[in-house]
Amino acid sequence: ESFERARELGDSGGLVGLGYVHYYGLGDVPQNYTKALEYYQEAADKNDAQAIYNVGEMYRSGLGAELNYSTSLLHFRIAAAHGHFKAIQMLGLSYWYGWGTNHS
């Protein structure tokens, strides 16, 4: 309920929260990766680093989105530029394993 209110107020954190609720299927909400991606993407469009990272993870894993390493790499780069630590780590792993780029 508070996440919905935050969303109404345009708060990206509320959108990320709604994404988590749907991603993990918390409370009475059934797990729904597609819906989670919609909320994460809406927050990512507001430049929320956590949301941008989460969108990248969903494209990397193929949960809620078609597997696309190039798209995940792009999101990791953007989130890393915002200083998101996990995105920086995933950016390194993407280069290490060649996910969306040449192995280096």
Image: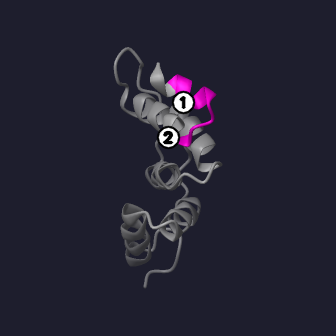
Query: Badge 2 is on which residue?
Result: 13
Residue nearest the viewer, comparing 33 with 4: 4
**Residue wearing tag 1:** 6
**Quarter location, residue 88:** bottom left
Q: Secondary structure at mark 2?
A: helix
Give the farthest residue toward the front.
9
Pick whichever, 49 or 56, lies toward us.
49
The quadrant the C terminus occupies is bottom left
Q: Position of residue 99 (x, y in %)?
A: 47, 68
| Type of secondary structure dominating the magenta stretch | helix
| Classed neighbour count for the residue bearing mark 2: other residues with Cα under 10 Å, few (<14), some (14–19), many (≥20) | some
Report the amino acid beneath label 2.
Answer: Gly
Q: Are marks 1 and 2 in contact (CB under 8 Å)?
A: yes
Q: Note whether 29 is above or below 65 in the view shown.
A: above
Tell me the quarter of the picture where residue 20 sits. Answer: top left
Q: Which residues are magenta?
A: 4-12
